[in-house]
Image (tube, coloured by chain):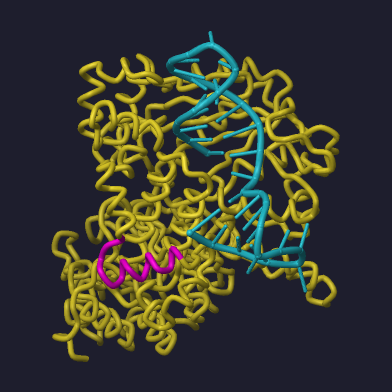
Chain colours: A yellow, B cyan
DNA sequence: GCCGTTTTCGGCCCGACTGTTTTCAGTCG
């Protein structure tokens, strides 16, 4: 490969992200001018482009405007704007908005309670263009005097600004989940709480979480609300009504951002007969729900958070009290979420798949497939995604042979407690001096300790095995920092890039591929190198990586560490499609990290991965067959 | 602006809560 010809790319899908941001902004600008319907059209296009698998430049190069228009939500007008952007780097329509209203709309609307309309007023009255100017105006007490605003709004803006500045609004799933579960348990313990579920992005196990949502059945919601807003840790009550309350909970110290932090939590109480509908509704995603409602409408039904209704004689929205489908509408379903999907002609869809990324179409295929024999084990076109109990062992654990905390014996004990059949020790190797990486000699020595421990388990008749691996380094040229003879003696070899992340795309791709082709390398760890909220993925041609992995039988890791979750959902789906096997590992540096496995499984589920796609769902003998 | 096995025109998901108003717009999910 001629590396000199390759220029560094901004990112694989940089244009996709840039365009989707522009279209989101156009939607906001149109919203400011109270233009009807166009904002939603632009937003829909923005979502479609943002989640597109393929690079939009390639799509345009291949098929021109015609093919762009095949993207759902993209018609003639938006396709032309995409082409304009790809050709000139600008969109005139957007630039004109920006000239008229030079507002950093993306930043300002991140502030809780501020949308496009208010942002426009703030600009017209006070020339506020960005977060810093917003904060200054609020501090000086200028905002309270504007019609439509007041003292409370001003105070909320100040708090909102502080929040955006501190956290950029989202939290890692791995750090939120334990906090959310604690609150869940407290609420669950109330005698007034008949049933409770976590909903929203937390139920969908998204890699980052904006806020925590709980759904509750209660005949007597007021004490629940009172309890919720006075929970220890609540630092702010945003809203408190009879059926809905919203608070900010302080979370102590955030180890990643090194600041003290808080997360918003919402509680919503619904009657039992509507619980399933509400569960569906509040789980989202928004796009999934919109699609579902449309299916309801096609069937002459109406779906909202209170239930599924026959829409015959339905009154216009807002005309009726709660728990209603409108005048004369009859409630068909609502208590059970599965029933709602069923009545709509769909197989039940696991929350992790609810992103309107084809899962509804797949679930629809149920009807056709039930006529076939295979209906029983595969009731729909949906994948039978990997389960949270399917993992038999963790192959990426660091021990105190390097700078991690626990001994190999301690890690093994923890793994046995988790019900695993094996654990893989994969310490860093010598290139990573900062981690006290092992050299060939030390690896051989480590092998002895592992052999001794395994002998002990045999004698005790414990059905458990420690596998000996390492996480070697892929050097800049794609070679490995440990000699082949030493690698060949290990049970398996993980290789990962831990340095020089800013290489040009072609060079980085070649580097990783060389490692994939190495006859001693079995697994590529955290294949794209991103760190959530910290570092973007390095530049690689992932399709080329997949082809090489498939050809060489090299396995790609889904690293479950909270700020990695790498591969991400889109890449997992691609890998599955390409027939590339994956392994879900925690990258544990102490035994408490072993519990992050759940995050990796969630990620695999969101990537539509099935048990068969993931090698460590297999018992140790079958597992070993995947190693070179 | 997009979309179409009911429509190339006429629809677009919809309800709760807040803060401001004095009957409702804006925001959120």
**Dividing the image into 4 quarters, which one contains the C terminus of chain A?**
bottom left
Q: Nearer the viewer, residue B13 or A435?
A: B13
Residue A587, picture quadrant:
bottom left
Q: Nearer the viewer, residue A68 or A307?
A: A68
> Is A129 on the left-hand or right-hand side of A606?
left
- Image quadrant containing the N terminus of chain A: bottom left
- Image vertical order of residue A297 relative to residue A316, above or below: below
Q: Is residue A347 above or below residue A119?
A: below
Q: State which quadrant residue A146 falls in.
A: top left
Residue A419 appears in the figure:
yes
Q: Which span is picked out in magenta?
A: A77-91
Residue drawn at the location 40% of the way across and 39% of the way down = A32
Locate residue A191, reporting x and y percent.
68, 21
Q: Is residue A82 magenta?
A: yes
Would residue A502 appear left or right of A575 to someone viewing this image? left
Residue placed most toward the observer, A153 or A608:
A153
- Image side of residue A89 versus residue A114, left or right: left
Say how many tags the image has. 0
The residue shown at (25%, 66%) is: A89
């Amino acid at each position: 490969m001629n590396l000199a010809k390759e220029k560094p790319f901004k990112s694989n899908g940089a244009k996709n992200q840039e365009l989707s941001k522009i279209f989101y902004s156009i939607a906001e600008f149109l919203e400011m001018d109270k233009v009807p319907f166009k904002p939603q059209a632009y937003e829909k296009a923005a979502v479609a482009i943002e989640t597109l698998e393929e690079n939009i430049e390639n799509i345009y190069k291949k098929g021109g405007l015609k093919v762009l228009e095949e993207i759902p939500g993209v018609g003639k007008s938006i396709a032309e704007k995409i082409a304009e952007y790809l050709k000139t780097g600008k969109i005139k329509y957007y630039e004109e908005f920006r000239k008229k209203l030079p507002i950093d709309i993306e930043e300002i609307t991140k502030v809780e309670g501020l949308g496009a309309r208010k942002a426009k007023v703030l600009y017209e009255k006070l020339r506020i263009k960005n977060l810093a100017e917003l904060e200054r105006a609020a501090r000086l007490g200028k905002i309270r005097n504007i019609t439509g605003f007041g003292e409370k709004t001003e105070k909320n803006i100040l708090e909102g600004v502080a929040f955006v500045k501190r956290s950029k609004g989202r939290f890692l799933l791995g750090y939120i989940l334990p906090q959310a579960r604690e609150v869940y348990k407290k609420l669950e313990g109330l005698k007034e709480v008949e049933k409770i579920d976590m909903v929203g992005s937390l139920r969908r196990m998204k890699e980052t979480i904006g806020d925590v949502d709980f759904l509750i059945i209660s005949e007597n919601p007021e004490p629940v609300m009172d309890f919720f807003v006075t929970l220890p840790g609540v630092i702010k009550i945003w809203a408190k009504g009879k059926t809905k309350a919203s608070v900010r909970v302080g979370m102590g110290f955030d180890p990643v951002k090194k600041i003290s932090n808080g997360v918003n939590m919402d509680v919503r109480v619904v009657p039992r007969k509507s619980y399933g509908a509400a569960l569906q509704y509040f789980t989202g995603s928004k796009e999934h729900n919109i699609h579902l409602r449309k299916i309801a409408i096609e069937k002459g039904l109406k779906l909202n958070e209170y239930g599924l209704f026959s829409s015959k004689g339905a009154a216009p929205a807002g005309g009726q009290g709660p728990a209603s489908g409108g005048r004369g509408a009859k409630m068909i379903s609502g208590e059970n979420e599965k029933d709602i999907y069923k009545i709509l002609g769909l197989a039940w869809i696991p929350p992790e798949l609810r992103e309107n990324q084809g899962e509804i179409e797949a679930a629809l295929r149920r009807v056709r497939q039930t006529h076939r024999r295979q209906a029983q084990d595969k009731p729909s076109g949906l994948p039978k995604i990997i389960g949270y109990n399917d993992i038999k062992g963790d192959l990426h654990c660091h021990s105190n042979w390097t700078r991690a905390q626990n001994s190999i014996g301690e890690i093994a004990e923890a793994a046995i407690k988790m019900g695993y059949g094996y654990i893989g020790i994969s310490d860093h190797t010598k290139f990573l001096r900062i981690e006290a990486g092992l050299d060939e000699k030390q690896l051989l020595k480590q092998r002895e300790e592992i052999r001794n421990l395994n002998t002990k388990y045999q004698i005790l008749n414990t059905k458990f095995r420690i596998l000996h691996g390492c996480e070697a380094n892929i050097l800049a040229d794609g070679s490995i920092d440990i000699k082949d003879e030493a690698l060949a003696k290990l049970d398996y070899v993980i290789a990962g890039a831990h340095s020089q992340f800013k290489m040009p795309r072609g060079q980085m791709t070649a580097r990783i591929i060389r490692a994939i082709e190495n006859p001693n390398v079995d697994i590529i760890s955290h294949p794209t190198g991103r760190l959530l909220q910290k570092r973007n993925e390095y530049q690689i041609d992932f399709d080329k990586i997949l082809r090489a992995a498939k050809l060489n039988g090299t396995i790609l890791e889904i690293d479950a560490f909270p700020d990695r979750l790498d591969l991400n959902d889109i890449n997992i789906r691609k890998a599955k499609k390409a027939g590339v096997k994956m392994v879900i590992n925690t990258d544990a540096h102490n035994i408490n990290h072993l519990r992050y496995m759940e995050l990796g499984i969630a990620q695999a589920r969101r990537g539509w991965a099935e048990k068969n796609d993931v090698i460590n769902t297999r018992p140790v003998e079958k597992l070993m067959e995947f190693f070179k």
